[in-house]
Image: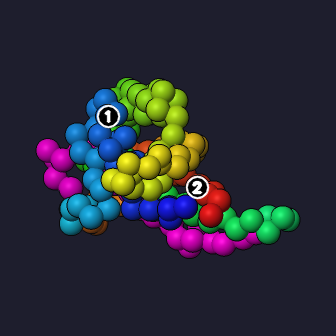
Amino acid sequence: MSQIDVLTLFNSLSTFGATVTGVKNSYAISAVPDKLSEPQIPALIIYPGVARGDLFHFQTFMAGAPHMVFSVVHQLYYAPSDSTKYRSIMPGLFAVLMDYVRKAQAQGFLDTRDTSDGSKAWQVPMNFTPTLGPAFPFADVNYHGIQFTYNFDIQL
């Protein structure tokens, strides 16, 4: 049995983000810029382990089957909050939110391992909690945006 490839899962999430209408850039973990400029936003960036503080947490079920639980935040930076009124960006922000949700429902799952060997990828459901906010910081700038928090529980 092949191992789960967490980076492939993150790349799958990044690829998904690029399909969301209204998002200009969806950055993989290896391509996150030092700062965001106006032409780069709205942008989605992945942060592993942010929601719980730990990237991985191992537990066992009563039957002893191990599983891995980790959190990932898929952060949408929509517009600088210091120079843009929330009321003026609400329609566009909600349009991105609704498209994200619709496309997640249609896709349903994210791949969790590399399939370059032709084997079938393991998939995990796209279960997330969106949080809207007026002040998500990135590179000393606060942004209006949405935090999509995923909690992945994968059996090993």
Residue nearer the viewer, 98 or 3: 3
Residue 46 lies within the magenta run:
yes
Residue 137 position in % (x across, y down):
36, 60
Q: How many other residues sit within 10 Å of disc 2, few (<14), some (14-19) or many (≥20)? A: some
Real-space Cα distance between discs 2 and 1? 21 Å
What is the image's colouring? rainbow
| Looking at the image, residue 68 lies above or below residue 122 | below
Residue 56 in view: yes
Q: In the rendered image, which residue does mark 2 sit on? A: 152
Residue 10 image-quadrant placement: bottom left
Residue 89 in view: no
Q: Could you say which disc has been placed on residue 19 in the image?
A: 1
Residue positioned 58% across, 55% down in the render: 152
Three-letter residue code for mark 1: Thr
Residue positioned 22% across, 40% down in the render: 24
Residue nearer the viewer, 145 or 8: 8
Residue positioned 46% across, 32% down in the render: 107
| Image quarter of the C terminus | bottom right
Three-letter residue code for mark 2: Phe
Tell me the element at label 1: loop
Residue 151 position in % (x across, y down):
59, 55
- Residue span colored magenta: 35-60
Q: How many other residues sit within 10 Å of disc 1, few (<14), some (14-19) or many (≥20)? A: some
Earlier sequence position, callout 2 versus callout 1: 1
Residue positioned 27% across, 64% down in the render: 30
Residue 84 image-quadrant placement: top left
Residue nearer the viewer, 46 or 38: 46
| Looking at the image, residue 39 lies above or below residue 48 | above
